[in-house]
């Protein structure tokens, strides 16, 4: 095993972001707590991940465990909101997060649910230095919080198998996203603690695509995620990327 590069380990980690999410670690599984928006968004995220992975790996999406046999990394897993349902779909799931308190919360909840999930307090760069390889990476609501996007995505590229794929989700940098995700969610509705998001770090789809290409990925699928305030439901949208959006990336030297 190669010796770890301690400079690379911390390059994508933002200490302020780690401190912010660590302070809320015990509330990850409270559906009415600070992570209420993620609880509401989760069914839509799961649907996208399941559909894209089944399509990419030519798996039967209708069977009970459609993701069985896949080794999946949830990078920046938080308290495990995505790890658990993906594990129930049959995948071998490794959840990684730079905040130790998040990992402790995730482990406790998985044990309570009787789920075998491998949670690790580790960064993407550290995992890559260990030579880990995964069939798929879930990179969901993370990239807008990292300090160094090229370092982070470069590590993700090293972690992904040649035939693998990565899902990403983030927020677009638009006036609408500022109004909804910051003014609305943080200041008016108080769904999120003030300071959870930095609008300047939101990424336009063209910017995400550019970062991905420079890190050896091509974005092959992109869909918007649209919130219906009347029904309090999220859904996928083929054209509306104005606030939240989700994408699929494959290695650029593995175009199908």
Image: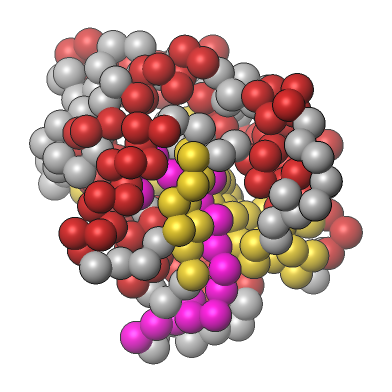
Q: Nearer the viewer, residue 149 or 40?
A: 149
Highlighted range, magenta:
64-80
State the image coordinates of residue 151 (x, y, percent, origin top left): 74, 31
For the point 51% across and 25% down, the residue is 145
Q: Quick check: 233 left or right of 164? A: left
- Residue under the image location 80 percent in, 52 percent down: 1
Q: Main secondary structure of the magenta part?
A: loop
Pinpoint residue 5: horizontal percent, then vertical percent.
Answer: 78, 31
Q: Is residue 134 visible?
A: yes
Q: Is-magenta flag for residue 208?
A: no
Q: Position of residue 6 (x, y in %)?
A: 73, 26
Which residue of the protein is positioned furthest toward the right in this rendering? 253
Residue in the image at 34% along x and 86% along y? 64
Q: Quadrant of the C terminus?
A: bottom right
**Nearer to us in this view, 89 or 58:** 89
**Along the viewing direction, whichever of 237 and 189 lies nearer the viewer:** 189
Front residue of 170 and 102: 102
Looking at the image, which residue is at 47% across and 72% down? 91
For residue 240, side relative to residue 163 (left or right): left
Residue 168: % across, % down:
55, 46
How many callouts does the rendering have?
Answer: 0
Horizontally, is 166 left or right of 187 in the view? right
Residue 239 visible in image: no
Colour scheme in use = secondary structure
């Amino acid at each position: 095993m190669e010796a770890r590069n301690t400079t690379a380990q911390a390059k994508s980690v933002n200490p302020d972001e780690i401190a912010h999410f660590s302070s809320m670690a015990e509330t990850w599984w409270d559906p009415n707590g600070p992570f209420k928006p993620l609880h509401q968004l989760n069914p839509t995220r799961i649907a996208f991940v399941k559909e894209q992975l089944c399509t990419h790996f030519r798996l039967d999406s209708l069977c009970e465990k459609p993701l069985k046999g896949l080794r999946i990394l949830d990078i920046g897993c938080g308290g495990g909101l995505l790890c658990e349902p993906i594990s129930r779909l049959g995948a071998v799931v490794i959840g990684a997060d730079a905040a130790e308190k998040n990992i402790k919360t995730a482990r406790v909840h998985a044990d309570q649910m009787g789920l075998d999930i491998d949670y690790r307090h580790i960064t993407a760069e550290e995992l890559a230095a260990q030579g880990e390889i995964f069939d798929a990476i879930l990179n969901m609501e993370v990239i807008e919080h990292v300090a160094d996007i090229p370092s982070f995505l470069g590590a993700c590229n090293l972690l992904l198998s040649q035939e693998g794929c990565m899902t990403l989700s983030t927020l677009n940098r638009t006036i609408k996203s500022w109004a909804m995700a910051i003014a609305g969610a943080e200041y008016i509705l108080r769904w999120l603690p003030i300071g959870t998001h930095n609008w300047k770090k939101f990424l336009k789809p063209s910017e995400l695509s550019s970062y991905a290409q420079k890190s050896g990925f091509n974005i092959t699928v992109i869909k918007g995620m649209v919130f219906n305030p009347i029904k309090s439901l999220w859904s996928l949208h083929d054209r509306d990327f104005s606030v939240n959006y989700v994408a699929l990336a494959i290695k650029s030297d593995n175009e199908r």
